[in-house]
Structures are given as structure tokens and as C-alpha cells.
Image (cartoon, helix red, strand yellow):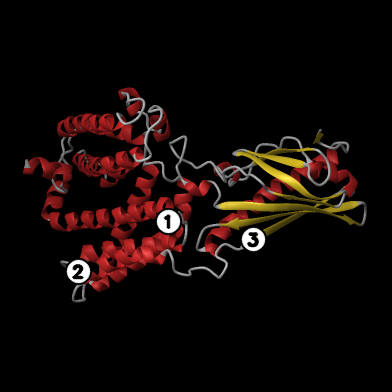
Amino acid sequence: MQKGLRLLFGFTDPVSRRVYAAWGFGLLGIKYLGDLLLSLSASEPLGPIVYLNPILSQRLDSLGSYPEWLPWVMFVWALPFAWIGVSMTTRRAMDAGLPAGVGLLFFFPVINYFVMLGLCLARTSDHARPSLRRLQSVGFNFKVALLSTAAASAFGLVAALVAVFGIQDYGSALFVAVPFIMGVISGTLLNRRGPQSVMQTLGVSVVSVTVAGGLLLLFALEGVMCLAMAAVIAYPLAMIGALLGRALTGSSNPNAQTFGMVLFWPLLAFLPWERSEPYPLRSVTSSIEVDAPPERVWPNVIGFSDLPPPSEWLMKSGVACPLRAHIEGEGVGAIRYCEFTTGPFVEPISAWEPPYRLAFDVSAQPPSMHEWSPYEVVHAPHLVGTMQSERGEFRLTRLPGNRTLLEGTTWYRLKMSPGPYWAFYADRVVHVIHGRVLEHVKNLSLTEPAQTSTSL
């Protein structure tokens, strides 16, 4: 019994291809049996073929109606299998003479199936034996490193779930405090029984953040782009926290201090990280000059035909991209529909001053992006409502030489903190969207006869 637990949850026992395959398929069956029993609370049980589908949303859809608690219990049930999977995959890769980092591919849906199948077939490498013996000889340090990583990653994952689905706030407590405390946890646990090098301490903090992000990706709670943007601030903060944790090991009771910081984290969500108005209304204005009079440009502002495929890398990364626009009615009270790749913006007209000014409110908007993910649906609340457009405006100014200065302005509220960091990306996105629309309106005004795209 103890030997089996050490093989599954341990750190140093080598894993041959026969052991890896036997335990892998056996644990797959045990996990499916548990999920099947849980799915009995739904209207349809979980079928074995559907179970192998890496798209979480489709697995849940196959259950029909189910209680709200079911996905969360399935998530908790999956955690120990995730630990066993990455631990045994790492040791199997080393046994086959491959880099230990191959084990991290376990977190990538679809890819992990091919990796695990390949490791079931790969022979044990003679060159792997010395590396495994060295691993066993320093087993304590390796064990402590993995435990430190696991503890910090678990905290980060739970804190993210509490912040997003509990407190429902993408604030500085999530993006600043959480990675910092993850670093403190990993740095303290790694160094508590003996000082480790600065590079080892920093490395464990980086791996902890990576594993937590991998789990969010694995369970379709986040996508690649948003994780990459968050990583820019998460990695440095985690490393700073790890150095603090390393320094804390010289205090009288470092474990108590770390535990106190973990308990203190929920209070950080209520600290005044932002100004008195937490999510101020922002505005972005872009402009272009058109070699045509305002009377010719105006009809292409209130409605325009299909835009060409995007060439900007940002628009190809999943960010909502404008496609076309049309208007129903005329004057104040008319409804303009601007179609994006994620759905339509519904824009009631609030100012109609042809051919110089068109203003509108935003009564409905689609998700801000399609996340890069192996899953069809990513359960990230920030995709809807976090970047909230409130109104927009086009201004046309007559210039000498029968030309027009065309300006587009968007007012939006960004419900994420720290505001200046996320606004850097958000403003860039709005400018690129403006640029596509303004350039298209310019081209239409130069190549097509003036006409109004109005639907009555």
C-alpha cells in the first residue's frame, strides 16, 4: 500500500512504460467511474465516448440538465488525478531519457493524449538511469520543491476561483496580491529546512505560477491570451514574493507568517486599490483624413459593407473584430447594428447631425474576444461585461480642398485592476478597431457612390 502511494504521489520512484500504461488506464477507469456516479444527478449519465472529449462544455452539454454544484465537485474530484498525472508523466519522461519538462505537457488538452500515448511506447533509456539515481540522491530537495510548487499553485488556483466566481472581482487582489503571496508560499516552504539558492527559489515561484495557469487552461477557466497578459505582472510579483519568503526563513516562525498572509488575502479584495471611482469612464479617439467631402463620407459612417479580412495580429488573436454595420430607421431613436466576430453591438442613435456628427449609446454588446483555447467554450466571466462600452461617436470636420477629418470616439468602462496596466491593452484594442473601421469608411468614400445603408 505504502509503495503504491509512493509510486503515485511520490517524487523519485522511476516509472517504466509498463507501469505507466497500467496505472494510467486503471486510473482513467477509476476517474470515469467517479464522474459517472456524479453524473447520475444529471438528466443524462456521462457516456464513455463523450468522457474522452477534451471540450469540457460539450461533456457538460451531454448531461442535459444538472445541478449547479456538479461541475465544481467534478473539478475537485479531478485534482488528485491531475497531480498523479503530472508526477508520473514527468518521471516516465525522465525514464525514457526525455527532459523532465515534458511532464508539463500534461496540462495541455489534446496534446496530452499524444504525449501519454508516446510515453506508453517509449523504451527506458540507459542514459536515464544516472539521472534518476541523482534524483533519488537529492530526493528530499526535489520533494520539497514539488511540495512548495503544489502548495503555491493550489493557493493560486483556489484564490482565483474565489475572486472570480465568489467575490466576482477582477481586481488588484487577484492580479497583484495572489501571485505575490504564491511567491511567498513557495519561497518559504522551499527554504524552511535549509537555504536554497536564489535561482532555485525564483525557479520554483515561476513554476508555481505556470502550473496554476496551466490548471486554469486545463479546466477551461481561462484562455491563452489572457493568461499571457496576466503573466507579465504575475511572474515578477511571484519572484519578489519568493525572495521575501526566502528571507522569512530566517525569522522565528516563518510558517506562521506565511499562513497569516494566506488568511489575510481575502481582506485585500476590499482595500482601496483604485481611486474613489474604482472603474472610471475612459475614452479613446482615433482619426483619419479622407479625400472626400463630409456629404460623401456620412452615408458610409452610419452603415458600411463587409470589411476585408483583418491583417493586424491583434485582430487575429481572438479579439472581437468589426465585420459590417447597418442602421434601422433614421434620426435620433434609430438603431444601428455593428456586427463583430463575437456578435452585434446594439447602438441606439442619440445624436443625428448629418453630415457632421453621429452619436449613439450601447445597449447591448457581445463578448470582448474569443479566447485561444482547446475548448470551444471558456468559462471566464471577464469575456462578458468586464470591458463595457457605453457610447460612441463619429465626428466629420470639413477641411480645405473638399476633404474631411473623420474622428471616432469610444467611451468604455474597464472593470479590471490595476487599471493602468489593463487599460494599456484595452486602449490599444480600441484604437485598432477604430483604425479598421475608419480606413474602411475612407476606402468606401473614395471608391463607391454616396448611398445610405438604411433599413426601414
Marked residue nearer the N-terminal end (2 or 3): 2
Residue depicted at x 35% and y 30% = 42
Which residue is the extreme one toward the right? 401
Expressed as whole percent of the image width and height from the top left, the position of residue 9 reads: 17, 45
Expressed as whole percent of the image width and height from the top left, the position of residue 26 reads: 19, 30
From what the image shows, is residue 239 above or below residue 287? below
Q: Nearer the viewer, residue 288 or 75?
A: 75
For mark 2, give the secondary structure. loop
> How many discs mark residues in the rendered view?
3
Marked residue nearer the N-terminal end (3 or 1): 1
Expressed as whole percent of the image width and height from the top left, the position of residue 368 reads: 57, 46
Q: Nearer the viewer, mark 2 or mark 3?
A: 3
- The residue beneath circle 2 is 195
Q: CA distance from mark 2 to mark 3?
A: 48 Å
Asked where in the image residue 373 lies, by quadrant, the reply is: top left
**Mark 1 nearby-residue class (10 Å; few <14, some 14–19, many ≥20):** some
Q: Check disc 2 and give the amino acid type.
A: Pro
**Mark 2 nearby-residue class (10 Å; few <14, some 14–19, many ≥20):** some
Q: In this orientation, does residue 122 appear?
A: no
- As drawn, is 248 to the left or to the right of 402? left
Expressed as whole percent of the image width and height from the top left, the position of residue 341 reads: 61, 38
Q: Nearer the viewer, residue 271 or 378?
A: 271
Q: Nearer the viewer, mark 2 or mark 1?
A: 1
Q: Check disc 1 and give the amino acid type.
A: Ile
Give me the disc on residue 167: 1
Q: CA distance from mark 3 to mark 1?
A: 24 Å
Asked where in the image residue 218 lies, by quadrant, the reply is: top left
For mark 1, give the secondary structure. helix
- The residue beneath circle 3 is 282
